[in-house]
Amino acid sequence: MREAFKRFRRGVRALVSRRALDREMDDEMRLHVELETEELVRAGMPPIEARRRARLAAPSAREAVALNPPPARPPRAPVPGTR
């Protein structure tokens, strides 16, 4: 019973962490598009075209993760008294 609860807790923690990472990636991609749009508008491009080009230039979330993978977590030390 304890082992099942531990697995459940780990699963919930992983799900929450994944959602937080997804939100963080969305925010970062949005910021990238906004900054690129502002730069293109300052260069004289109409705002609608600038936003379109900024969105096309931004990598997808999948591409961004492939280019910048999250750091690998070190293995956990075994807890004494467990398998």
Image (cartoon, helix red, strand yellow):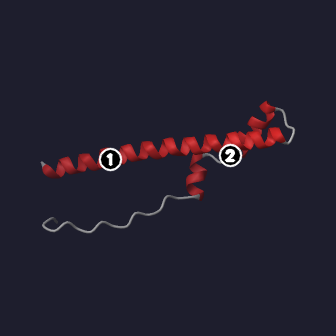
The residue depicted at 51 percent of the width and 44 percent of the height is 24
Quarter of the image where one finds residue 68: bottom right
Under tag 2, what secondary structure?
loop
Tell me which numbered mark, 2 or 1, is placed earlier along the sequence: 1
Q: Amino acid at mark 2?
A: Ala
Instruction: Residue lying at the far top in this picture: please name it.
Output: 48
Q: Give above or below for 21 relative to 76.
A: above
The answer to which of 31 and 53 lies nearer the viewer is 31
Under tag 1, what secondary structure?
helix
Quarter of the image where one finds residue 76: bottom left
Q: CA distance from mark 2 to mark 1?
A: 30 Å
Q: Amino acid at mark 1?
A: Arg
* Residue 77 in the figure: left or right of residue 21: left
How dense is the environment of label 1, judged by Cα within 10 Å: few (below 14), some, or many (20 and up)?
A: few
Q: Which residue is mark 2?
A: 58
The residue depicted at 60 percent of the width and 58 percent of the height is 67
Q: Quadrant of the C terminus?
A: bottom left
* Residue 25 in the figure: left or right of residue 43: left
Where residue 37 appears, x then y in whole percent? 74, 39
The residue depicted at 15 percent of the width and 64 percent of the height is 82
C-beta proximity under 8 Å, tags 2 and 1: no
How dense is the environment of label 2, judged by Cα within 10 Å: few (below 14), some, or many (20 and up)?
A: some
Q: Which residue is mark 1?
A: 13
Quarter of the image where one finds residue 28: top right
Where residue 65 appears, x then y in whole percent? 55, 53
The answer to which of 78 and 36 lies nearer the viewer is 36
* Residue 58 in the figure: left or right of residue 43: left
